[in-house]
Amino acid sequence: MIRFEKVTKQYADGTTAVKSLNLEIKDGEFFVLIGPSGCGKTTTLKMINRLIGVSSGTVSINGKPISDYDIHELRWEIGYVLQQIALFPHMTIAENIAVVPEMKKWSKEKMAARVDELLHMVGLDPATYRSRKPGELSGGQQQRVGVIRALAADPEILLMDEPFSALDPFSREKLQDDLLDIQRTIKKTIVFVTHDMKEAMKLGDRVCLMREGQVVQIGTPSELLTNPENEFVREFVGMQEMNLDWHDVITPVEDASVNDQQPVPYTMPLNELLERMAAAEVIAVEKNGNVIGVIHRSNLLRKMAQYVKQGGRLHE
């Protein structure tokens, strides 16, 4: 769907924001870019819709270099959501949502139907909200409108640059949940920039961790947790601080000797347990000198996947 081939971005002052970047984002994937400030994640995002031009290399969409697209048509076909919501204050909510469809000369009837459909999608009653001005909405409601405005012309791709970072924690979590619900319905290709690892793990099908303009590791949330490429990934993901109780995935058995392996202690920290299980599908667990059961790698990974998709919290 979106491919970067040896893409470099160097500015006139000699600063290199992105260095020979190679990556591919799949059709319908929720792909998250994350990393320290200045790592190149926002530059990478903005090169997709040519808000920032590449210095060398090729960015292509569906096999076609973005340089071959008319720039206006390219941007019409790519939704874009910013941290700064940037709704037009003098326009109604309906008029804000319909900006790109109007540029594409949709009929009034088609635009009105699309506005109502999208407002319903994010839980805003069209009869109540379509005629309001942005100043009459809360920050969370305005950001919902920002998201659906980017979807108004039904683009294939949605770019989101730290869209929820300015919101309070409750509104942010609600919008994350809303976005996941929307994605299950619309199945767009979403490229999402964030500095929050918990947000990345909750939202992403795959997460790309960048550092100094280069990719350090790309993988599913579980892959980054269980198989970090290096110490930088381990520390950034925050495995050492993960508050995950793994003990309820122990399967009690009477004889829990497993391939003559040394049982792991019940008190073992999660990161050490993961290292032990990297080479074993099943391992025994002991408590107070007695083997109490076994833990299966698949069960542990399932629990961890639930953990990260819940943004660091498990269902009770």
Image (spheres, rainbow, N blue to C red):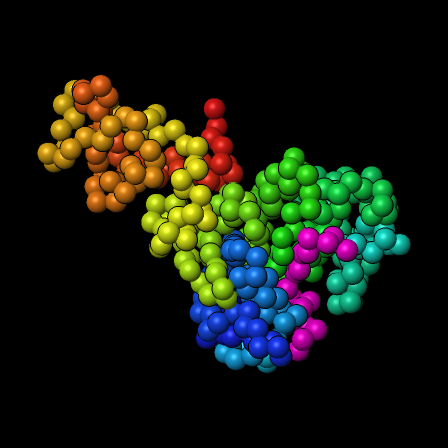
Q: Residue at x 29, y 31 (%)?
A: 268
Regarding residue 62, the answer to whether it shows in the image is no
State the image coordinates of residue 113 (x, y, percent, origin top left).
76, 51
Q: Position of residue 274 (x, y in %)?
A: 30, 40
In the image, taking residue 104 as reference, residue 239 lies left or right, namely left
**Furthest residue in direction left, as rendered:** 260
Residue shown at 42% from the left, 47% from the top: 235
Instruction: State the residue in front, 98 or 150.
Output: 150
Left or right of 212 in this view: 170: right
**Residue in the foreground of this view, choosing between 82 and 286:** 286
The answer to whether 5 is drawn above or below residue 252 in the figure is: below
Up-down: is 176 above or below 102? above
Residue nearest the viewer, comparing 154 with 144: 144
**Residue 314 image offset from top left, x and y in percent:** 47, 30
Residue 97 sits in quarter: bottom right
* Residue at image point 48% right, 45% down: 201
- Is residue 244 on the magenta stretch? no
In the image, farthest residue toward the front? 13
Q: Quadrant of residue 141?
A: top right
The vertical placement of 257 against 67, above or below, is: above
Residue appearing at x 62%, y 79% in the figure: 12
Q: Position of residue 222 (x, y in %)?
A: 39, 45
**Residue 125 visible, this orientation:** yes
Q: Which residues are magenta?
A: 70-86
User: From the viewer's perspective, is 266 left or right of 79?
Assistant: left
Where is 72 relative to 291, above or below? Answer: below
95, 141: nearer the viewer:
141
Quarter-of-image position of residue 271: top left
